[in-house]
Amino acid sequence: MTSWAAAAAVVLAGVLAAPGAAAASSSRSPAEAACATKYRVTGRVVAVRRPAWNDGPVAKPNSPVDHYVHRGDVLVSCIDAIARTQSGPAYRKCGRAGSVWRVVRGGQIPATCMKRV
């Protein structure tokens, strides 16, 4: 048996051994369970923006708003999107200038409006 087959057998045995415990222990999606980086929103009310069809992969300050989050909300983010500009920062939000957007459920939020927990 090859090493990858042995590893797959161990994982499969662990899943089959306690199917109810694994499902009950996590109410998050598998993508969120793999990432444990949590951020607390520091801005008063911050828009979660989804890039428009012609914006590319990174949101812009005028991208459509998906929903809003409020100060104190805890969000999970594993991926950063960096908006590169030649003339300076990509946005000015929550009292600071920046170019990093954190990818969260529903869209992207400026990194200047979040603090790592």
Image (cartoon, rainbow, N blue to C red):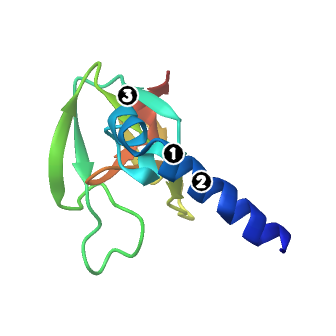
Which quarter of the figure has residue 25? top left
Q: Which three-letter amino acid code belongs to the residue tagged 1?
A: Ala
Regarding mark 3 in the picture, which secondary structure is present there? loop
Of residue 17 and residue 67, the one placed in the foreground of this image is: 17
Of residue 15 and residue 87, the one placed in the foreground of this image is: 15
User: Looking at the rendered structure, which numbered label has been put on residue 13?
Assistant: 2
Q: Residue at x 35, y 22 (%)?
A: 42
Marks 2,1: beta carbons within 8 A: yes
Q: Residue at x 84, y 74 (%)?
A: 2
> Marks 2 and 1, how far apart in space?
6 Å
User: Looking at the rendered structure, which numbered label has been put on residue 95?
Assistant: 3
Query: From the image, which quarter does the N terminus lie in?
Result: bottom right
User: Looking at the rendered structure, which numbered label has been put on residue 82?
Assistant: none
Percent from the top left, x then y, of residue 114? 42, 30
Q: Which three-letter amino acid code belongs to the residue tagged 2?
A: Ala
Q: Name the residue under label 1.
A: 17
Residue 99 shows in this picture: no
Q: Residue at x 43, y 46 (%)?
A: 32
Answer with left or right where residue 113 lies relative to residue 4: left
Regarding mark 1 in the picture, which secondary structure is present there? helix
Percent from the top left, x then y, of residue 18? 46, 41
Percent from the top left, x then y, of residue 74? 34, 27
Decide: is 83 above or below 30: below
Considering only order in the chain, which callout, 2 or 3, is on the residue closer to the N terminus? Answer: 2
Which quarter of the figure has residue 90? bottom left
Decide: is 94 above or below 47: above
Q: Which three-letter amino acid code belongs to the residue tagged 3?
A: Gly
User: Which residue is situated farthest in the bottom direction here?
Assistant: 54
> Marks 3 and 1, how far apart in space?
51 Å
Residue 5 shows in this picture: yes
Considering only order in the chain, which callout, 1 or 3, is on the residue closer to the N terminus? Answer: 1
Q: Residues within 10 Å of mark 2 (few under 14, many from 20)?
A: few
